[in-house]
Amino acid sequence: MPGLRTPIVAVALIAVALVAMALALAACPIGTPRERDRDAGPDDTGYPAPRTDVTAALGSAGTLDLAAWNLKNFPCGNASFETTCRSDQPASVELVSDLIASMALDLVAVEEIADEDAFAEIVARLPDHEGVLSTDSYFDGTYQKIGLIYDATVLAAGEPLLLFASSDDFPRPALQVELTWTGAGEPLTLLLIALHLKAGETSTDRGERTRAIAQLEQYVSNLVDGAGQDNVIVLGDFNETLDAEGLPVFQPLRDTARYTIQTLANFNAGEETFLASGAILDHIVTTAALASAIDGARSKIPRLQYDVEDYRGRVSDHLPVALSLANP
């Protein structure tokens, strides 16, 4: 019937359009939004505003929320960690920026930064953030650097300092930065030490980590007892477990009158940060003076592998570990 031709065609076209729309949405995995789904970013960044809905927030407006995160040779992933690695690995700088914004973290200590430009882009994509990157590199010019990314509206950072640069037990010098939290109440000054210890499962590797932690504890105890810097946070990839085999390595930090290994509670709960083995290798240790600021809060390990499609392939084989502090 000629009079029905136009409505039938219209219905068919609408059906085709709906199918195409469904396919387009299905092809947009978490962490890779279409540009039209983003708000325009601030003029001074040159990038779209980061997403804040990729995963659940860990932080809040009234707390100082910090984390340690090994980004696995970022942004190279499994590729060679030469400085040309960015073209070899599809891991998204944008996705990491979106995850930091979504977790609502004020500070992230990152390990295994294999490209300085990629690190700078993360910082640029996060409005009001600044970054500190280790100057250390390996003998052949390659590197896996430690860095800090922090919200400069609530944190003021002092000059960075590389620790244990001459020690054979630290393949990568620890990165120390004094931070002042100005976001709530009276300013709170912290000394943050980010580290990435020797990897490996041999007795030689474990011996190296044992000596490194002994040196670290001696340094921190001197800060507390001699320099009067009570508020110290050590965080990063210790490459060591908290099971019966690994706990002796942490012996100098197991003095509960002086330190709290925050991730011990996560270990007892059966959580993981290293997805390849199910172990917790990334830790946060705090000095006793911070107990009131932490007020019994438990460190958190977000299960990003369930929120981000192919998390291990696109981001890292490590999960971050985070801790929130309140201004006492």
Image (spheres, grey):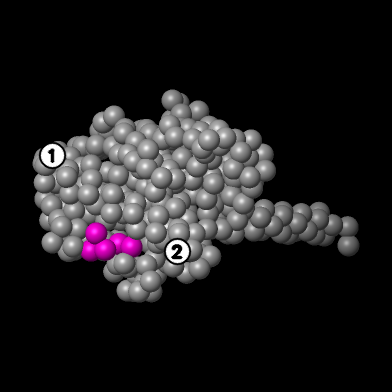
Q: Secondary structure at mark 1?
A: helix
Q: Looking at numbered disc 2 in the image, what kind of residue is underneath it?
A: Ser
Please tell me the numbered disc located at residue 203: 2
Residue in the foreground of this view, choosing between 307 and 88: 88
Q: Looking at numbered disc 1 in the image, what kind of residue is underneath it?
A: Ala
**Rendered view: 173 above or below 141:** below
Q: Residue at x 18, y 62 (%)?
A: 255
Bounds of the magenta segment:
249-254
Mark 1 Cα shell of 10 Å, populated few (<14), some (14-19), many (≥20): few
Q: Residue at x 28, y 49 (%)?
A: 216
Residue 29 at x, y percent in the picture = 60, 55
| 304 displayed left or right of 264 | right
Mark 2 Cα shell of 10 Å, populated few (<14), some (14-19), many (≥20): few
Looking at the rendered image, the quarter that the N terminus falls into is bottom right
Q: Residue at x 49, y 49 (%)?
A: 71
For the question of whether residue 82 can be seen, the reply is: yes
Q: What residue would you read off at disc 1? A: 227
